[in-house]
Image (spheres, rainbow, N blue to C red):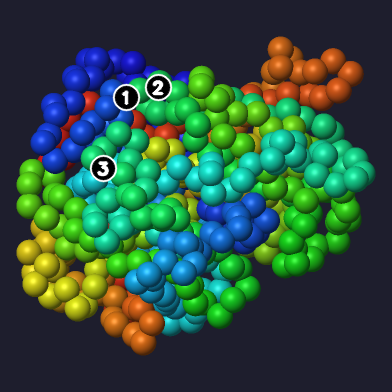
Amino acid sequence: MIFEVTPSQTVGPYFAIGLPFGDQQHVVADGTPGAITITGTIYDGHGEIVPDHVVEFWQPDPEGRFADLHGYGEQSTLEGFRGFGRWCVEDGDGVYRMLTIKPGQVPFLNGGLQAPHIDVTVMARGMLHRVVTRIYFADEAQANAADPVLQTVPAERRETLLAQPTADGYQFDIHLQGPGETVFFAL
Amino acid sequence: MSTVEQQPPEVPEVREIYDPVADTPTNYRREPAEAHPPLDYPPYKSTQLRHPKQPLVYLPHTVTEITGPQLDRAVHLKPTDSDLTIQTTGEPIGERIIVSGHVYDTEGKPLRNTLVEIWQANAAGRYAHKWDRWAAPLDPNFKGAGRTVTDDHGRYEFTTIRPGPYPWGNHYNAWRPAHIHFSLLGRAFSQRLVTQMYFPDDPFFPYDPIFNSVRDEKARERMISTFSIHETQPNWAQAFKWDIYLRGPAATPFEEAF
């Protein structure tokens, strides 16, 4: 027997009541050597900022190891590494900001390596289901060129998945719709 | 509950790059389009500028998608987190209810030790949130947020106050049916789900575009809790049961691989 999944519903406008916890936007502990900030702005189809949004990251550490594996491979030994970050400020300027560390490479399905990437969930009022994207890094041209997922993205849209280097990390804007619409994935 | 017959799942073949343990899928089932609401749903007006228009790109389930956070350590759970009626010094007003159920995957396997987060309006239908300004009273003794982790059987339980329905600006005389927001992490990034639990026989169901954005009637029913006299605590609290199903493993391992 197989059961049917419970359907998704919008996170709504009032998620800030229930979703925040402590240092939620810290994928790594404060003070971790090599920590960076990944920041970006969320835009709607008119190019207006989306001030009420939830952004979540899931990623491995620089060695390509995850914090919570549920049985897969070697667990991260980086102290204070959570691998998960959540940004859920609802009256901001449309900008999310995550304290993290650049991920290492992890294997693909049948061998080979994927380019460094972060899985990202975006939710908001007006979104009945999450959207999923991946952050890749613009300064990893060689690894990106060999990444089996990135190669399936139409070449003219790959740029939307590349985080650009900044003084203290990277910038990754998310366009939910319209010109420069971010590539979202079917999971 | 709608169910279909299928062959028992095969044991996933072991790949050298991973070290799979029992009960941990290496590959999640692809969900049919009608299982979840469309991102573009004009009756819910706020979807208009917040849905992608380009086609989604197929993402294989690699190690990043089949692992996921175990947040129970990060959120520092306290006993009051699962009882929303004892989070202040006074008692909140309204019908005291126990909301409980199990978190399963679509194979019926319980998800143990997984974080369940909820938030909701008070008995008058007002959220303790600065943006909620409609003319219903706030309750100083009701914050409206809770957290727990499932036990060894995948069971969760909250004690709370039955939320009221409330008006919103989507269309003339729009009201949301009473609901509790649920957020689930599951075991894997692929299982992440945010949804809403509704109450039986809500008169606002036919008029609510968010509820009806789930186009399949049986799928809508899966969002509605059931009253349970068995779970009711005499002289204390009514009870509603609601089981949650997160996506499970694909029937055939690697059917999605390319």
Taking depth in this image into account, of A8 and A166 the one nearest to the observer is: A166
The residue at which mark 1 appears reads as B23
Q: Which of marks 1 and 2 is in front?
A: 1
Instruction: Residue B218 in the image: state x and y as whole percent.
Output: 47, 29
User: Which picture quadrant has residue A133?
Assistant: bottom left
The residue most toward the top is: B230
The residue at which mark 3 appears reads as A74
Q: How far apart are marks 3 and 2 (CA)?
A: 25 Å
Chain at numbered mark 2:
B
Q: Residue B109 — which label?
A: 2
Q: Do labels 3 and 2 share a chain?
A: no
Element type at marker 2? loop
Which residue is at 33% across, 41% downward? A69
Q: Residues within 10 Å of mark 2 (few under 14, many from 20)?
A: some
Q: Earlier in the sequence, mark 1 or mark 2?
A: 1
Which residue is at 78% across, 51% downward? B143
Q: Which amino acid does label 3 sit on?
A: Glu
Chain at numbered mark 3:
A
